[in-house]
Amino acid sequence: MALLPSFAGLPEQPALRPGISVTRHDDHHLQVGVDPPQRVVVPDVPAVRRLLDALAGATALPGPDEQTWPVLRRLWEAGLLVDARSVAASITHGPAAAVRAAWAQFGLGAGDRLGARAAARVRVAAEDDARADVSRLLRASGVQVVEEGAADVWLIVHDGEVPRASVDDLVREGVAHLLVSGALGSVVIGPFVLPGVTACLRCVDAHRAETDPRRALVVEQVVSRPPAAVRDPALHALALAWATRDLLRFVEGDQPSTWSASFDLGPVAAPERRAWTRHPHCGCSWDETLVSQAG
């Protein structure tokens, strides 16, 4: 199909984004999509119907004419079209459900995101059941879960407090990691730690010590004992899914919701977000302290 100059960038085989519906708008118009800005109302005429059928994959794309080109332009400008070839190629190399969801969510940007997922290596440190749940979600999303060796990011899950020594090496080695911990049947997601950039777990401890100086001593005693088996199944499942989504955001190049922050998930109240800054008394932020002193 020859492209007009004004359609630079339009794929040779355009298709409607997965999940986009075509419905009746009124007696004389059809509607593509549901809500703005990803919604276009078009004339209900045979040529446009043939175009929409082709974009949905039912028939071959018809040649351009004065009725279909304006519709194609509006669909393109509304972000309702993707490259049919790229979608098909992605499905052959990744989980079909995740691939279709990515193209529905990100449109033409899905290819780069799916490529970033496929290139990422994630390690999960958790009890067997939690590790299996998270690994299943990550693999279903097109991410490689590794059992040993180097990883781009870690997820660390504990039913109780996270042993501080278990993450110290990750901080020293500059490895990104996300923490999920539990307390009294509630769950804390975060912080997501990028060493040298965001607050680490010991930064959080230092902030908490400002109002509770003996807390660190108590935590060290708690983590030295087996965690109490107190786990709300619904909150635990929510936390693992939330954490998985944040890992995907990170490997795709976005900032996770838990970036230098944590969310408290309780049985009654809405999730409570707490932002954390790097603490000047924490070893992970001494580089900033030295720079400020040198200045």
Image (tube, rainbow, N blue to C red):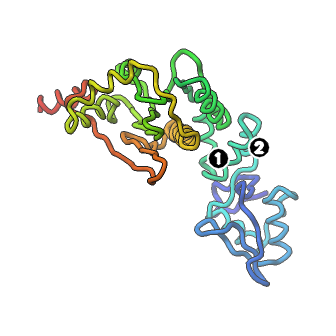
Q: Which mark is residue 88?
A: 2
Q: Quick one: 280 or 50, which is closer to the camera?
A: 280
32 left or right of 204? right
| Residue type highlighted by circle 1 | Ala
Element type at marker 1? helix
Q: CA distance from mark 2 to mark 1?
A: 13 Å
Which of the 4 image quadrants contains residue 50? bottom right
Q: Residues within 10 Å of mark 1 (few under 14, many from 20)?
A: many
Q: Relative to 130, is 76 above or below?
A: below
Q: Position of residue 103 (x, y in %)?
A: 66, 49
Q: Which mark is residue 102?
A: 1
Circle 2 SS class: helix
User: Image check: 69 left or right of 121?
Assistant: right
Query: The N terminus appears in which quarter of the rendering?
Result: bottom right
Say which residue appears at 77% left-offset and 43% top-offset.
88
Q: Earlier in the sequence, mark 2 or mark 1?
A: 2
Residue 153 visible in image: no
Label 2 close to label 1 by CB (< 8 Å):
no
In-image side of 57 versus 173 (left or right): right
Percent x, y of residue 157: 49, 29
With respect to residue 48, does 244 lie above or below?
Answer: above
Image quadrant holding the C terminus, namely: top left
| Residue 53 point in image, percent of width and height | 83, 63
When the figure is inspected, residue 73 is found, relative to residue 41, above or below; the finding is: above
